[in-house]
Image (cartoon, rainbow, N blue to C red):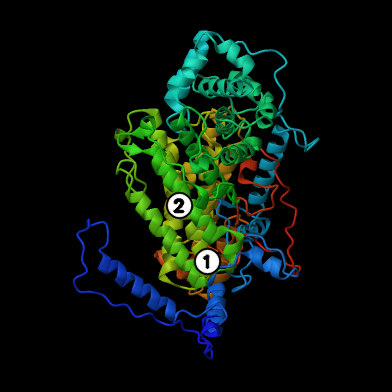
Amino acid sequence: MNCVKRRVPCHFSINKRRIRQTLSNSTTTNTSPNRPTLAASNHESNSRRELQAREPTAESPEHQYQHLQLRSQSPKLYIDHLLENRNTRGRRQIEGSILKANDNYVGSSGLAFFSEQRIASITERLGHNRLRENIESLAVVIHTRMNRTVNPFDSVVGFSRPSSPVQITNESAKLYIEAYFNQAHPIYPFLDRADFESQALGAGRDQLLKNSTAFSALYHTVLALGCQYQDGGTFDPGKGTAWKLYQVALGLLTDILVPKEALVNMQAIISMAIFAHNSSCLQIGNMLTAEAARIAQLLGFNKAICQEENEAACHRTFWVVYILEKTMCFACSKASILSDFDIGCPIPEAPEAVFQGFDWFFTMARFSRLISRAYETLFSISATLNTTETTYANIDRASDELERWRLSIPESFRPGEPFQMKHFPDHISMAVAVRIRYHYESIIIALSRKTLHIEGENASSRRSSSKNDLMSAARTVIELTRYIDTEAHAPIWFIGSMPLSALFILFDFVVHNPAHLETKSNLSLLGVAAGYFCRLEYASKGSLPSSLLSDFAAIARQYVDDLEASANTHAEVRDVANMEPLSMQQTMGGMESRTPSSSVDSSFLYTEALAIDPPSVESLSYPINYMPLSMVGGLPEHLDIVDLFDNIMVDYQWPVAWEGGQHQGMA
């Protein structure tokens, strides 16, 4: 335009004309340290102009090339591939990556569980069907207990109010509320105690219960949670005083979800979710947690938006929901509702959640963020697109973050340090100490198994370290079972899922390493686990048929003993071979008569196992690839590790078919 006005030829260039600036050496001003001088400001302006002069214009090829480069560097999610080409096949977490199909499985972030293929493989190795029979017997017991054999859609958990009102005296209500704030509240500190007690124990309580459905649900759930600590809880749904109180809240659930969301609605639902984490009503625990997260987003609590008078209560409630939702999603291998990139809610102080200098509330918030990041980069569907190098980098990053988190915990509570009862004078501090260790070991198990999937059978220091970490984590989990309080109020993840996963891991190590020096210790710990599961069944008065799991220890020990006896017999036979021919046949007949009556395959000799199992961690076998283990959430949606205690148990005879006509184990 300027060229036209000046009536001169135009010369187009991708560079802009630089404007010469004349700066006076004396151009200085007295300014504050936080404000740049005029000379400095002019210098910055010149720098920006020079940079703009070097930048390509929007129409230039250089700009287009840089734009394409920038776009190519942006990471793609799997959904992007689906939308680019509608013929792209669907993908589950347990399928191989594009880079390394059928080998580099992206395992679930949950805990170990046996697949049908794994059961068949171990059964063949053992030489008998006791493992399968044990699992099938357990499934039958659970089906019978849950009344699923007649109508699999029947459920003991209902959402109707009790036929008759629950009568609780003021003294009992005060006792239950006090028990709640002393035992449950320090672990889930989302309520303002003074505010709640003024409403729950004040003169206007009855009128408030009539006027506010949400407060009524919150009130009755708090009573139910506290009642569990006063011998009012049971392991069975529909039984006990605590369940009757909880049933009142369940009957109000639909009325809480429909109206306009408010803090008390969110608090009512999260309290109901906390109760549902025990063994009596696991079917609805995840649903309630997800609903609480949904309401938190609708209210804007994630963005520190709070229309309530008690802002600290809003922040507390949000972070309790965040912790529960993130840990639930990681354990079940599901994407989180709460997006971490859209959270600006500050973490408030919670003095009641601090134990001898250990800030449980803040520590668990950090842990929840850690596992959220690990799930996204290692266990999500889009993680299947990562190269091996990227996956290793993500594993190392998660491990480093986990170690920094561990070191931030006081030594007496710190995972990886010796557990000393003298540091925990009361029940609640000991429970917190065990829980924080279980959370830590669950991530060690997930990261170790992920590494073993990638490494396959390649001998490497990383693979050896992962096997050692996996075995050590399982051992620690079982060692800590002696400190678990097997009461009805305990979360099933705490008293069931973690010990069960550790049992399966050590069972695998024993069966595949019968002659290894570590096997004796693992057999002893399997015995400890067997004792724990018997104790759990006794505490539940038979409601949890967990003593059936103790047979794993017997199967493993019998397998090793039979192999040792078989090895001794074959050693004697070799000695006989050097004797005179006349007596050889008679002696060998005697040896055969002393052969153990075992169904163990004689082709797999203990002496051969000893030869391939020298006493080192590197030699430990853990068949993670050619006989994959399935994981919680990695199986079809209708099967979860909590099936052992409350949900429908899938028939183990059902094959799992994948594309290509092959039956593939799950990661």
- Badge 1 element: helix
Using the image, determine if residue 47 lies above or below residue 194: below
Q: Residue at x 71, y 41 (%)?
A: 648
- Badge 2 element: helix
Residue 86: x and y in percent read 75, 68
The answer to which of 240 and 2 lies nearer the viewer is: 2
Residue 65: x and y in percent read 55, 81
Quadrant of the snapshot with the N terminus: bottom right
How far is the residue under mark 2 from the one under mark 1? 53 Å
The answer to which of 332 and 650 lies nearer the viewer is: 332
Quadrant of the snapshot with the C terminus: bottom right
Q: Is residue 646 left or right of residue 275?
A: right
- Residue type at the position of mark 2: Leu
Using the image, determine if residue 153 lies above or below residue 9: above
Q: Earlier in the sequence, mark 2 or mark 1?
A: 2
Q: Is residue 329 left or right of residue 478?
A: right
> Residue 547, located in which quarter of the rendered image?
top right
Q: Is residue 516 visible?
A: no
Using the image, determine if residue 476 lies above or below residue 432: below
- Label 2 belongs to which residue? 370
Residue farthest to the front, as pictured: 6
- Label 1 belongs to which residue? 570
Residue 339: x and y in percent read 55, 50
Q: Is residue 142 left or right of residue 227?
A: right
